[in-house]
Image: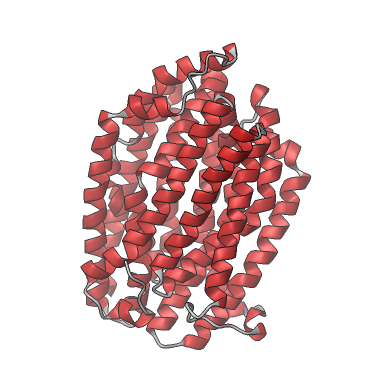
């Protein structure tokens, strides 16, 4: 788990290198996911099930703005990895400087727009009925912290491109621990309700940003930029944009999917059905952390070796990453297949003074969520191929296939399925859409990746 210099990405054995890069990434994702999971547990037990639904409605909007930082980070980091592999350090520095400036301009603009149109955005994403007011409270406060989250996500990807996965892990752990402490303080001790939950998260985002800033100003980072690097460079901006658009498009489709899901589910079962999906969303973020960790660890290794034209190492990286992630995905699947009831119960309050409306929601959620979990995660053992395949094209700078493969699962298959299947199968049609989309997307990605490997990695 030790940090390494960027040059070692092209030297060390692939299996060992993938573990070094992936374990810190997986731990960071785990801690961050646990934070979201436990945060939801605290909110559910100390505020109520409606509060979980309110947060679920807000997250796609705020995450999309934060995804601007992530997309700039992923797009720029692909350039940085390949530039370092090709010993072009000046291009790496210019790219990082442009990432900093672009993140500032984009996120601040989106936050301003988000605040202006608050009353229009929240209902579109499903904040109806009793969900609206708590969702609005949470949304406004969270927006203040989103630029800090965007910079954290951008910097996190650059850290990994430098071969510093341990620092990237710390950047994710710090806000997670801080958020849990602030949750206890603001929700439980000071009884601030939804506002307390929102300020806890916003404070955590700022602490994470502070750590990222410390890393790049310290001797730990190889990327020491000057004011000249901050000025926009059009060719670099175009490359960041084309590659980063893949990540942004994925998050946009995810946000649009939440919009559709929340509205479809509200029509099927009201606030209670949205609460079911909110719990499943938290488990999705948490349960797949080892697979996402492998994917994150894979990116800088593949990018560096592709830039250095070490194509045998690139192929070995692809196959090793798919193998490791598939094994971990299968273990996750078995756990969720066996313990869905126990996981669901974690989110539900058993307080005696719980309002009657929340008690009804809890009963509904406990009856409907376990079976939904089994269907949603049914294809987990095979999704590694889908994720690694799409990530490969982003790592090597091929934006169009990366974009198409990234959108395959959500855009080309999942959205049409959730619009069609509920008309025939009701609620079950929603949950069946998940594994069907995963299987179809994995087949398409596997065929395309195999073709690309034969054509270029020779």
Residue 426 position (above or below residue 213): above
Residue 165 position (above or below residue 252): below
Residue 256 position (above or below residue 144): above
Seen from the viewer's position, the closer of residues 143 and 437 is 143
Tally the numbered discs: 0
Residue 68 in picture, x, y percent from top left = 59, 58
Seen from the viewer's position, the closer of residues 304 and 451 is 304
Residue 59 in picture, x, y percent from top left = 57, 42
Task: Give the image's coloring scheme.
Answer: secondary structure
Residue at 46% x, 28% y is: 347
Seen from the viewer's position, the closer of residues 347 and 353 is 353
Residue ranking furthest to the right: 116
Residue ranking furthest to the front: 189
Seen from the viewer's position, the closer of residues 338 and 400 is 338
Residue at 61% x, 34% y is: 189
Residue at 56% x, 20% y is: 270
Q: Is 301 situated left or right of 411 in this image?
A: left
- Indicate the quadrant where residue 388 lies: bottom left
Residue 205 in picture, x, y percent from top left = 59, 54
Is any part of residue 231 visible from this angle?
A: yes
Residue at 67% x, 41% y is: 139
- Indicate the quadrant where residue 392 lies: bottom left
- Indicate the quadrant where residue 130 lies: top right
């Amino acid at each position: 788990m030790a940090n390494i210099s960027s040059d070692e990405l092209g030297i060390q054995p692939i299996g060992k290198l993938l573990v070094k890069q992936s374990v810190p990434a997986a731990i960071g994702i785990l801690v961050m996911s646990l934070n979201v999971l436990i945060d939801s547990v605290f909110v559910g037990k100390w505020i109520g099930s409606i509060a979980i639904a309110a947060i679920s409605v807000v997250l796609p909007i705020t995450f999309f703005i934060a995804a601007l930082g992530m997309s700039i980070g992923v797009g720029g980091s692909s350039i940085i990895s390949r530039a370092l592999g090709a010993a072009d350090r000046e291009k790496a520095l210019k790219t990082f400087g442009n990432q900093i400036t672009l993140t500032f301009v984009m996120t601040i603009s989106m936050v301003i727009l988000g605040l202006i149109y608050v009353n229009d955005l929240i209902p579109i994403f499903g904040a109806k009925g009793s969900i609206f007011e708590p969702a609005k409270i949470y949304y406004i406060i969270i927006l203040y912290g989103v630029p800090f989250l965007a910079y954290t996500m951008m910097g996190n990807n650059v850290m990994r491109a430098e071969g510093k996965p341990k620092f990237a892990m710390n950047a994710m752990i710090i806000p997670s621990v801080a958020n849990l402490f602030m949750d206890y303080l603001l929700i439980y001790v000071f009884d601030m309700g939804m506002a307390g939950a929102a300020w806890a998260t916003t404070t955590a985002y700022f602490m994470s940003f502070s750590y990222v800033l410390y890393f790049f100003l310290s001797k730990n980072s190889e990327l020491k930029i000057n004011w000249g690097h901050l000025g926009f460079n059009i060719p670099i901006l175009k490359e960041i944009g084309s590659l980063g658009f893949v990540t942004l498009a994925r998050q946009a489709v995810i946000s649009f999917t939440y919009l559709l899901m929340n509205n479809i589910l509200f029509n099927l079962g009201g606030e209670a059905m949205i609460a079911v999906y909110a719990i499943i969303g938290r488990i999705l973020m948490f349960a797949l952390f080892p697979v996402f960790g492998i994917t994150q660890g894979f990116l800088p290794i593949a990018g560096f070796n592709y830039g250095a034209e070490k194509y045998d190492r690139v192929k070995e990286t692809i196959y090793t990453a798919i193998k490791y992630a598939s094994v971990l995905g299968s273990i996750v699947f078995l756990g969720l297949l066996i313990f869905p009831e126990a996981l669901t119960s974690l989110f539900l309050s058993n307080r005696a003074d719980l309002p009657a409306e929340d008690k009804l929601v809890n009963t509904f959620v406990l009856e409907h969520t376990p079976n939904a979990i089994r269907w949603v995660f049914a294809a987990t053992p095979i999704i590694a191929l889908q994720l690694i395949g799409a990530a490969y094209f982003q790592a090597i700078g091929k934006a169009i296939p990366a974009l198409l493969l990234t959108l395959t699962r959500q855009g080309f298959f999942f959205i049409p399925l959730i619009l069609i299947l509920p008309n025939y199968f009701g609620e079950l049609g929603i949950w069946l859409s998940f594994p069907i989309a995963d299987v179809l997307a994995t087949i398409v990605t596997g065929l395309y990746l195999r073709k690309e490997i034969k054509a270029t990695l020779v």
